[in-house]
Image (cartoon, rainbow, N blue to C red):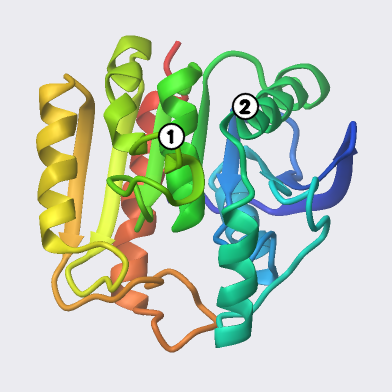
Amino acid sequence: MICMDTVHERIEIEAMGAYVARPAEPGDHPGVIVGSEMFGVTGYIRRTTDRIAALGYTAIAPDFYHRTAPGFEGQATPEGRARGFELLQRLDREEVLADVRAAMAYLRYEAHTGGRMGMAGFSLGGHLAFFAATQLHLAAIAVVYPGWLVTEGTALGRTGPVLDLATGISKRGGRLLYLSGADDHVITPDETRLVAERLTSAGVSYEMVIYPGTPHGFLADERDTFRPAIAEDAWRRIAELFGTELRQA
């Protein structure tokens, strides 16, 4: 696995704040957008963005809450979850698409990443990444314990389950990696089976990995849900996805 020295900065794209990390050395560094959890662009998400950059990519984590609570950084506490759920319910499909497009434009024209791009999303961010991939040309999409794909009425599913849009991913040729835990309190086994069935019927190119005995948030290194061995395997798979799909000629 590539491990490069990185540099990072906070930027603003129009009215949207974002955290950007890139390899310190010049070269071909394809772009990856990072979708954060309901808690916003926290220290954990910034470290995640740094880790993606260390794999050899220019990574950008947009503040998807910039219209309602710019700079929000919540914690995995009852109060933090309540506030995060309130904010995610105020997200709008067209506004999220505008934010992803703005991040893609930054990567292409300001960071000069060129051609193929990917997106990695975690929990709520997986929900956002899945939706973005149904509408935009993302060559590689890693959705890690993505919440509410099959649920109508939550986040971007208020006008219907985001999973219903899965054919958009196959039409755009994106490759999807779906990672979750068998003991995830957000995603039931029935929901996981439904996701697999729908991805297959929609003709999506995908890999699904469900880790036995593993909870939601197994990549979150600051919480008791963190599972180091599972996290390492997940990162290996994410690195392979991006390496295969984003570095094609």
In the rendered view, tell whether residue 128 sits above or below residue 218: above
Residue 217 sits above or below residue 171 on the image: below
| Residue 54: x %, y % from top left | 60, 51
- Image quarter in which the C terminus is found: top left
**Residue under the image location 67 percent in, 61 percent down:** 40
Q: Amino acid at mark 2?
A: Glu
Query: In this rendering, would 142 be left or right of 3?
Result: left
Which residue shows up at 43% across the image and 46% down it? 127
* Residue depicted at 69% across the width and 54% down the height: 5
Give percent across and percent down for residue 105.
Answer: 73, 20
Mark 2, residue position: 94
Residue marked by disc 1 = 159
**Residue 186 appears in which quarter of the rendering?**
bottom left
Q: CA distance from mark 1 to mark 2?
A: 12 Å
The residue sitting at 32% across, 10% down in the picture is 171
Q: Nearer the viewer, residue 248 or 185?
A: 185
